[in-house]
Image (cartoon, grey):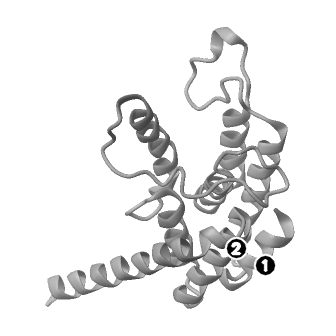
Amino acid sequence: MRSEMGGSAKASVTAHRAALIAYYESIIRDCSDLEAFARCAEFAAERAHGDVERFVRDMGYLIFGQVVPHAGIIAGPLDRVFAGMWRRFGWAPRQTAVHRFGSSGFAHDDKSNQVQHFWYAVAVAYRWGEGIADFIARMIEWNPPRWLRWLPFTGRGHGTPEDLHLSRQGIVLGRLLAERRIAPEDVGKWIREKL
């Protein structure tokens, strides 16, 4: 009996996530990345029925391709490794979500995946709090001297104040969600107004 329920729950999650990806694919060509992100947040919120944890996990699945709770925290950097493998060797272990979104519609349009950048800060702040999220954001956007650019998770000369600001906006939303001061249903509107 227990395995049946487990299998049924897994099938439900798989179908739910497939619907989210299908929805994304149906709207992305007709609007900016920011608007598609906001609409996907509204779609995920509607299907989460007020469950913040489910909403954060589903958005992580869409943005990072995560398949287990909170794996988005490592899935983002891992996706970048896989994307690099694809560019260099023409092969990667799985299809990456890195290029699912871009940066159109954002106040700072740097032609990269601003949605992933923002949601990574949301996920870390939601799970581990503002202090850790801010430390990681500073590290990712830090441009060390040339002789230290080998350090992992640094800006390696590409960090920008605008991206640090975007991360801090993600930290704010992550804490609002964690503290239940914003409902998933209001995240799409928040994204449109703040980003």
* Residue 178 visible: no
Whole-percent x, y for residue 6 in the image: 23, 81
Label 1 Cα crowd, 10 Å radius (few <14 / some 14-19 / many 20+): some
In the image, what residue occupies the spot 65% across and 41% down?
A: 136
Q: CA distance from mark 2 to mark 1?
A: 7 Å
> Callout 2, which amino acid?
Ala
In the image, what residue occupies the spot 39% across and 34% down?
A: 85
Q: Which residue is mark 1?
A: 189
Q: Element at badge 1?
A: helix
Residue 77 vertical position relative to residue 27 in the rendered view, above or below: above
Q: Are marks 2 and 1 in contact (CB under 8 Å)?
A: yes
The numbered mark at residue 38 is 2
Label 2 Cα crowd, 10 Å radius (few <14 / some 14-19 / many 20+): many
Nearer-the-camera pick, 129 or 109: 109
Nearer-the-camera pick, 51 or 31: 31
Nearer-the-camera pick, 171 or 179: 171
